[in-house]
Image (cartoon, rainbow, N blue to C red):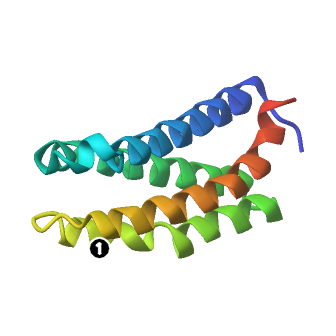
Amino acid sequence: MIITEESVTFFRDYLALLDTMEEAFDYILSKEMMEQPDAMVKMLPNIISGWDQINKSHRLILENYSQNEAILKCVNHYYRKVSKYESDVLVELNIFSTELLAKMSQAFSNWRKEADSTFISFVAQ
């Protein structure tokens, strides 16, 4: 598979987005934020925006790299293990469940390890 400079840039940006999402989860679930529920709720739009960006990225990845078994598996794992929490968090937005957010954060973190190993080869070329 030929990787263009544009693809390398895309995957670098994608991995940076995943970094940002993980940092956002860590921040929201930090002790300081747990003591400020209003501040936590204010951060949720950033998480929701990040989900939107990840979903857009995945659509683009699947359009261009769906023939790559590792990529297909990784993106499918995201939808099975992580994104299932998106709608739950949106439904409970008014109630704001830190427990639910913690579960999603853990699922994201576990999936993130797979994503790093899958996509890092595209950036290293």
Q: Give percent across and percent down for residue 80.
A: 55, 75
The N terminus - image quarter: top right
Image location of residue 85, percent across then percent down = 39, 70
Locate residue 9: give its quadrant: top right
Q: Nearer the viewer, residue 30 or 122?
A: 30
- Numbered-mark total: 1
Amino acid type, callout 1: Asp
Q: Is residue 12 visible?
A: yes
The one nearer the camera, 56 or 112, is: 112
Helix, strand or loop for disc 1: helix
The residue located at (79%, 29%) in the rendering is 4
Residue in front for this viewpoint, 91 or 14: 91
Determine if residue 46 is in view.
no
* In this rendering, position of residue 4 left or right of residue 6: right
Q: Residues within 10 Å of mark 1 (few under 14, many from 20)?
A: some
Left/right of residue 76 with respect to residue 66 in the rendered view: left
Residue ID at (27%, 40%): 32
Q: Name above or below for residue 12 compared with residue 82.
A: above
Vertical placement of residue 45 versus 87, above or below:
above
Give the camera-side residue of 90 and 73: 90
Image point 43% across, 68% down: which residue? Answer: 103
Would you name the residue on which mark 1 appears?
88
Q: Residue at x 16, y 43 (%)?
A: 42
**Relative to 47, does residue 2 appear above or below in the rendering?**
above
Q: Position of residue 39 (x, y in %)?
A: 16, 42
